[in-house]
Each structure stands twice: as C-alpha cells, then as structure tokens.
Amino acid sequence: MLRWTIFASVPLCLLLTGCPLTDHYRLQEDTLGSAGTHQGGEPGADASAGNELSNAGLAERGGGANAGCDVACSVNRPCVADHCTSGWASMADPPSMLVARSKAASVAMGNAVFIWGGLDSSGAALENGAIYDAQADTWTYLPRDTGSPSARIMATAVWTGSASNKVILYGGSDAAGGMIYRDGAVYDVLGNSWSALPGNMMLSKRSAPYGYWDGTRAVFFGGQGGMMTVVPGADRFDLKGWSTSMAMGDPGLLGFPAIAFDGSVMYLQGGVIMGMRQDKVFAYTSSTDTWSSLSKSLSPRTGAFGAWDGSAFVVWGGEDDMGMRADGKTMTGTRWSEMTEPSTLSPRRIAFRRSGWAFQVEPGVVGIIGGQTSTLGTGSVLATDGATYAVQSGEWTEIPSWPSLESHEYGIGVWTGKEFVLWGGRTQNLPTLTGERWTP
C-alpha cells in the first residue's frame, strides 16, 4: 500500500524552515582504473544543530511508541528511555508519479531530502522529482511549471538554508551524457515554484560538480565536461548573478579528490591530474575567493572518503596504484594525525555516483557508508555496510548492511543531520524504488 502525502493544505515550507544547512554530495568519475568512478564527500554542516520538526509531521512521530517520551522520533523509530531506536528503518513508498530512477540530483533540507531528475528504466532523462520528509516518512511530489529545468541526469542541487529556503539545481547532462549543461533553475520552497537560473556564457558546462552553500552563494566546483574531461575551478551564484572563482592557486584539472566543506572553506586532498594520482592538499575560501596549498601527508590516491567532523578534515580509504586503501588521516589546522585501522570496514573507495558517502554524524564523529571494494566495475563489488569513526578516541563502530541488500547503484545518499537516507538507484541494472534510512 502506498504511504505518501501531498500536502494540499499544509505549505511545504513547514517541512523545512528552521533547519540548519546540511550535507550534499559531489560525485564524479575517475578515469583511472577499470571502473572509472569517484564520488566526493559532503559540505561540513553542523550535524549537532537541532532540526525543527515539521508541523505536517507532528501527527506521525511514531504513534504510541513515543508516548511519554521527551524526544521526537521519526516514524518507525520507537522511543525507549528517551532515546530513538537506532539502526536501519524502512521508508514509505513514494507517490505513484515518482518513477524509479538513478543518477538523480539530491540535497538535504533539514529533515527533508530534495530529489530531482535522473534516469528512468527506459534510459530516458527525467524532469520531475519529490521531497521526502524523513521525520514524518512522507513524500511530496514536485510538479513542473514554466520555470522548471529541462530533463537531465547528474545535476547538482544546493539548498540555501532556511533563511531564503531555495534549492539551486545546476548542470548535469542529457541521458547519454553527451550534452553537458551550464543552466539550471531555482526552486522556491515557500512558493512551491521554479524559476530559471540567469544565463551566463562564461559559465563552465559541468556534470556532477561538487556543490555547497557558503551562507551567501552556491559554489559548484569541478565536475565533468565534454569527452569525460575534468572541469577546473568553480562557478558561484549568489541568487542574483554569477561569478567565477579566482584562477590563481586553483588546482587546475583535478579530478576525484576527497572533498569536505567546513561552512566557510572547501578542502581537497588527492585526486588525479593528467593521469597521475596526487597527494596535494588545497583549500578554497569562497568568501574571499582565494586558493591555498596545505601540507601534504597521505599517499597519492583517488576516490578517498572526505568529511568534516566539526574541527578536522577526515580523509579515509580511496585507491592508489596498488589497489584499494583502508587507511586515513585527519587534518586539524595544518597538522595531520593518523587514523586507527578499522577492524570492521573493508578497503574501499567512493565510486562515481554509484556508491559511497561520508558525512558528519555529530561533532567529532564521521560516518562512512557503501563504496566500491574492488577495481572491477561490476555491481557485485559495491559495499552495503559502513562504520562511524570517533576522531578523538580513534574508535570505529560498525554500521551493518542495509536491510534490502540492494546495491542502490547510482542512488541518492543524504545525511539530514539526524538520519542517513538511501533511496533509489538500480540493482542488477534495474531501477528501484526501495528506500532505507539509518541513524546511530
């Protein structure tokens, strides 16, 4: 039975206002290796900030399981001794208009997850989407209007935060990946409407760039251009117009580094330039439009998991010339520290919109889920488990495999600040509507 809600009488803004900036994931291809895959980390949102419950979801906080409980738990998470049940939980079926898809754009908006576009089962690009409220376990379908973006895959979505409450969707490509876009649209959450992004022929065409909101502007870094080329620099949109990042100090044609955003600075480690794996470390401050080189420490690698834990840049795993890695380091200021070796997490790398996500669970703790465990390109090498890492204690804690064991290849994985939402993608080359969510 479908369980979904079109909030005809409740404004969508009630789902999203009062929520802190949360994570979004950059996904790119690594042309090194037979799989040719990489996906970046997340902007470092304050995962400890309290997300407000949506008014629409208050009636669905887990029913009687939360009676007498002082904390509000999401649906299917009973409250026991003032703690919400941890682990994996199921997701409600989406509305019937939302078909199964892969390679969709997604971004967290407080407790909600925005999903748009992607590739359907017939290989056609899609031009619709929905918002999933993880707290209430409900869906809101996003109808098209005259300002909606054209159908596309591999676009990037950035949420502006609750102050202006907009989603900026940019870039991507056609279904075949041959036509790369440099346009997009802005979705106004309060007005439930779209408007086209202003055009600018100086913008780079970018498929699957890394995107984040720095408090003033959306920044779209890297991504792929035509003929599987890496796109240098960043394009920036401040809700009024576009600007291009400073070229001085830019890492250039850098593909597939570990990436994290701390709220003001984007950090990059490793990656590949002109076919050579790198060990370089860069930082970009968008408010001053400046690049800087930081101290190196990790070995050259591509596809490492990157996350910001609240005070440190965490880099783990990836692939070097010998194969998959299971080591990592954290950088606080300019000082690198060794990470302990995990006993429960196999060597792996983030894969090109196929699998692999890293995010801040709470201050000092990061989560790593999924990824590619072999240089082979088959779906059988996509992991379904993960672990959390406490930076100060060096303690790893297992995240068990998600219940469906579907690969969710090219699916969306988004940390909302409370839960990791995993939805869609494909299993054995068939798109799926299955979704599941995890909380520690």
Image: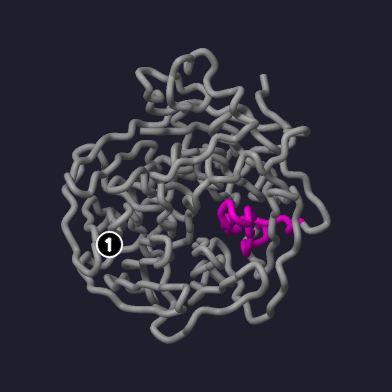
Which quarter shows the N terminus? top right
Image coordinates for residue 406, horizontal then vertical, percent: 48, 33
Name the quadrant containing residue 151: bottom right
- Using the image, determine if residue 132 lies above or below residue 351: above
Q: Nearer the viewer, residue 331 or 120?
A: 331
Residue 259 among magenta residues: no
Image coordinates for residue 340, horizontal then vertical, percent: 16, 48
- Using the image, determine if residue 420 lies above or below residue 320: above
Instruction: Decide if residue 143 is in sight here.
Output: yes
Which quarter shows the C terminus? top left
Image coordinates for residue 6, horizontal then vertical, percent: 73, 33
Left or right of residue 301, residue 232 in this image: right
Q: Main secondary structure of the magenta part?
A: loop
Over which residues does the magenta segment extend?
148-175
- Using the image, determine if residue 283 lies above or below residue 247: above
Q: Which residue is mark 1?
A: 320
